[in-house]
Image (cartoon, rainbow, N blue to C red):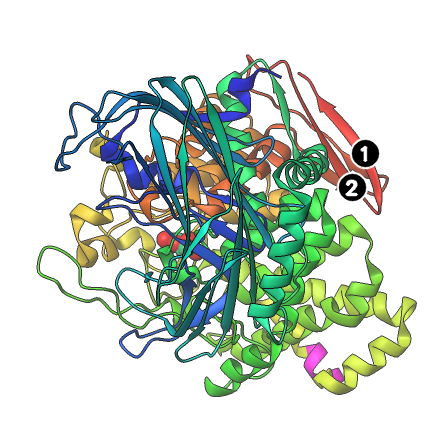
Amino acid sequence: MPDRLWTVKEYPFHPEKLRYYETIFTIGNGYLGTRGSLEERYDGDSPATMIHGVFDHAPEMSVPELVNAPDWTDIRLTVDGTPFQMVTKSSSTLKPPQGLILGYERKLHMDTGLLRRVVLFRAATGATVRVTFERFASLDDQHVMAQRVLITAIDGAPVIELEAALNGDVSNNGVRHWHKLATSATTEQIALSAVTGQSGYAVGMAAVVNAPQPVTPHADPVRPAARLRVALAKDGSFTCDKITAIYTSRDTADAPSAAATKASAAAALGYDALYAAHVAAWRHTWDALDIEIEGDEAAQHGVRFTTYHVVIAAPRHDDDVSIGAKTLSGVGYKGHVFWDTELFMLPPFTLTMPPIARNMLMYRYKRLPGARQKARDNGYEGAMFPWESTDTGLETTPQWSDPLPPDNQRIRIWTGDNEQHISTDIAYAVLQYWRWTGDDAFLLNYGAEIVLDTAVFWGSRVEERHGRYELHNQIGPDEYHENISNSVFVNRMVVWHLEQALHLLDWLQQHAPHTAQRLHESLGLTPARLARWQDIIARMYLPFDDTRQIHVQFDGFFDLEYIPVRHYEPRVGGIWGFLGHERALQSQVIKQADVVMLMALLGEAVGPRQVLLNNWDTYYPRCDHGSSLSPAMHTWVAARLGLDDEAYYLFTHAAAIDLEDNKGNVVDGIHGAASGGLWQAVVFGFCGLHLTEAGPALAPRLPAHWRSVSFNVVYRGETRRFTARH
Ligand code: BGC
């Protein structure tokens, strides 16, 4: 495959896009993610390493957040005394003695999870060197991070000074979470440990520098370093490797010792051996997950890029963590886990690397106590999952926004109270996992309990009014409309959920009566309760306009102000931003796929094809895709409805969300749901992959210029390769 389909490149250097590239060039291994910040640091950059599961609630914050870990990538250089800095002729903010960048290229190698930067640098003395920086987070051993610096004299014979450090001077946008910082530096290792203030998680980091000559340790209370001074011969070169190991108290009782031992062992193996094992793990991963698209290089590249980013965030060896909305690539959404995981990021793993999907479902299983507490606190039964979830499993959605321009007003955030469909989204993911994998053990021991206890919640949540069942004070996927009545998405998904719960009970009764018995008893699945579920299924109100033959998004939707969304093109971001919160709430502008999302999830079960088309014609023009979750779901549905032009247009939009920063906020992190959604748009949308009695099958509806799409899925333990053609 040509290199350009497996790489993302920055060339030339764009100092004004520092933070964009930091996000785009994030590397990771499912244990941590590290933004692509330049080793030597700049004003305005935002380096971050996010380790799964390490949350902390700082006193000045309203909610806990995933903590930015100490920085393992820090390396500084001087060439003949000139600090190595990315000074181009147009960006001379530095004081003399200055160097100059003569050449530059940075590439993320998605096939191997390697970030490489090559710089031609001329020192103030005129000596010129080529400096190559490489880094990877080992996919083979998740505690090992490796960096290599290769310096070659191009002109002259300069003296190089190199300082490789671990840097404890980090924060989440100014909020400091690390306390009890301890550091050490010897000729063998530098090390750093710290503990989060409220949650008490410890991190231990240790790094060994392998270089042609011994290093000089530099003790520092915050930034221990190893230093090196090399006089390069003319045309000479040298290589320096920094191997860092990282553990937290989530992994082991003594994280600093584990890091010290691992760093020594990994450094003894050496960079090349570590890299070889890492590449082998990546090859295995791409064999499982890659989608090959023939006939459209941009599409191929876009899908690989988004797949890469969900892969590097997906927990491989930990079933107590899950992926936050911005993956591990930034501090956006505070690392919190939303429905983005179950309905957007998880399905690619369910279908290709089920053990990873299982880890993330176990994360939810282990948080059933928190979900039960939320239900109780709100006066309901069963399990009510939080809209935003962290390590505790308790609701962690902030109640108020950060101050918003222009007048620094905070607005009340209702999603934590009323965006309740999350419980059904999780049940959907559990059942999808079970159907594809046939993992009965998971279902019997964990999954069924999730599906059934969330069904118990809905049984207690619905309201009997007007001789039918209704749901008030809800928020559907379209978050521009808060605290609404009878969201068709929510009501229909609840019906689906209860139907599935009853089927599941029948299945358990037949195939695992002991489990059925246990769950009947522990969850209180009395005949009266099951009869009520039946009744809800029969009498749930699903808003429908008989005249127009469409589903009505919620009660009163069409009484709101109609705003022609298309007139507001071209624009960056949602219409909400310029309409203002209040007016958006009172308008028919939709933030994201809502009725359309329902059609993606339930397909033709939602209604006859003509109704689905009517729904599309009604809601698509009203949607401003203010959420990045939207275009991929629209692609999926448009492809299924045979709306080829719309499907392809929306696909290109979805594929560009991060690469072209078309939401304008990539600096906060990768849009994980959009990324996982894109994989699904291709597989479920264009290729029409679906399950039949006989197993998986395709119903392709490819864009006209695509020749084929090939991918693997694992169905009940067996890998099957599919190729979709016209
Ligand atoms: C979207 C939600 C999503 C959240 C996190 C919001 O803007 O409307 O659907 O869960 O972002 O990505």
The correct choice, above or below, for 177 with respect to 219 in the image is below
Which residue is nearer to you in this view: 296 or 224? 224
Q: Say which of 666 and 531 sits in front.
A: 666
Q: Position of residue 276 (x, y in %)?
A: 68, 35
In percent of width and height, residue 658 lies at: 39, 37
Residue 542 in view, yes or no = no
- The residue lying furthest to the left in this view is 407
Pick the quarter of the image with the N terminus. top right
- What residue is rendered at 45% in x and 78% in y? 199
Q: Split into 4 quadrants, where in the image is the C terminus? A: top right
Where 193 sits versus 659, above or below?
below
Disc assigned to residue 207 = none
Amino acid type, callout 2 = Val
Residue 280 location, quadrant: top right
Provide residue 714's location: percent of width, then percent of height: 78, 41
Q: Amino acid at mark 1?
A: Arg
Tell me the element at label 1: strand
Tell me which numbered mark, 1 or 2, is placed earlier along the sequence. Answer: 2
- Can residue 295 be seen at all in this image of the molecule? yes
Q: Is mark 1 within 8 Å of ligand 1?
A: no
Quick check: 418 left or right of 95? right
State the residue in front, 508 or 40. 40
Q: Estimate the spatial distance between the alpha carbons at disc 1 and disc 2, rounded to whole Å.
A: 6 Å
Q: Residues within 10 Å of mark 1 (few under 14, many from 20)?
A: few
As drawn, 384 above or below 108 = below
Q: Which residue is mark 2?
A: 714
Q: Which residues are magenta?
A: 526-531
Seen at 16% across and 30% down, the residue is 91
Dots 1, 2 in contact, CB < 8 A: yes
For residue 323: magenta? no
Crowding at dot 2, Cα within 10 Å, few <14 / some 14-19 / many 20+, comes out as some
